[in-house]
Image (spheres, rainbow, N blue to C red):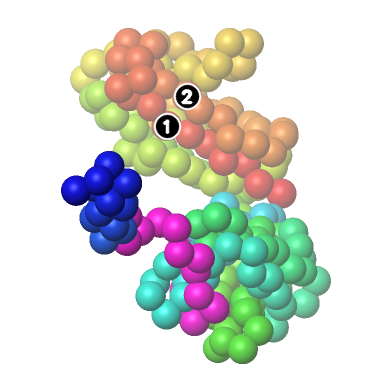
Amino acid sequence: MTAVASHRLSVLALIPLLACNGGTAPPGAPANVVKTGGDAQQWYFNNTLPLPYGVQVTDANASPVPGIKVVWTIELGVGSSLSADTTTTDAAGLTSNTHTLSAATTYVVRATVEGLPPVIFSATAQAPPTSDSVTVKDNLYDKGTVVIKVNGSVTWGWAGANNHSVTFGTGNPTSPTQSTGNYTLPFSTTGTFDYHCKVHGSGMSGKVIVVN
């Protein structure tokens, strides 16, 4: 066998292997749109939902399809807004949209790819609480997260036998290290405020989310 013939046979032998490895075939036409997150959230009037609405577009073989336009429409929820009217899928076939709620109670948002059935998202809203309470037990806070309206307050009450504190970041108010009593802190700005116990560090922690 000549060297040329041998080389040709080697190349032919590689073709099935390359086909098996895949990854080179382009995706087909969009065939499916599925939710990837953000549906059925419960949040508060005039605030942005914590999670975006997400979808993935795939072809008939369940391969992601990039570069596909998704049109977003608010079907229910007067006065609310989306971060974009149209988004485009990325290399993984994914795209998302952020929804800022209004004073309405119920919301419905439709995500549509041309030629395919739409995907429907829903959300509900209520007034945020103006105050909340957290029990400080031995080695834990009974609520990992509380949400209050701006200018509201949170009260921590000690119920364990050991000393604990409610300590926010540098420069923020902090409670004494104690085993009894209460500590109330007002919050005048929106945001997420993490705290921990001086005695137990990050192993005993919580957060306050302040919304509009």
Judging depth in this view, the residue of 61 and 134 nearest the camera is: 61
CB within 8 Å, label 2 to label 1? yes
Left or right side of 179 for 85: right
Residue 109 shows up from this direction: yes
Q: Name the residue under label 2.
A: 195
Task: Kindly report the distance in space between the C-alpha atoms of the residues bearing marks 2 and 1.
Answer: 5 Å
Q: Nearer the viewer, residue 43 or 99?
A: 99
The residue where tag 1 is placed is 206
Residue 17 visible here: no
In the image, what residue occupies the spot 40% across and 56% down? 23
Could you tell me which secondary element the residue under label 2 belongs to? strand
Measured along the vertical axis of the image, is residue 75 above or below residue 80? below
Amino acid type for the residue under numbered disc 1: Gly
**Residue at the image point whose x is 47% and y is 24% from the top:** 195
What is the x, y in percent for residue 113? 63, 79
The magenta-colored residue range is 18-36
Q: Is residue 62 above or below residue 167?
A: below
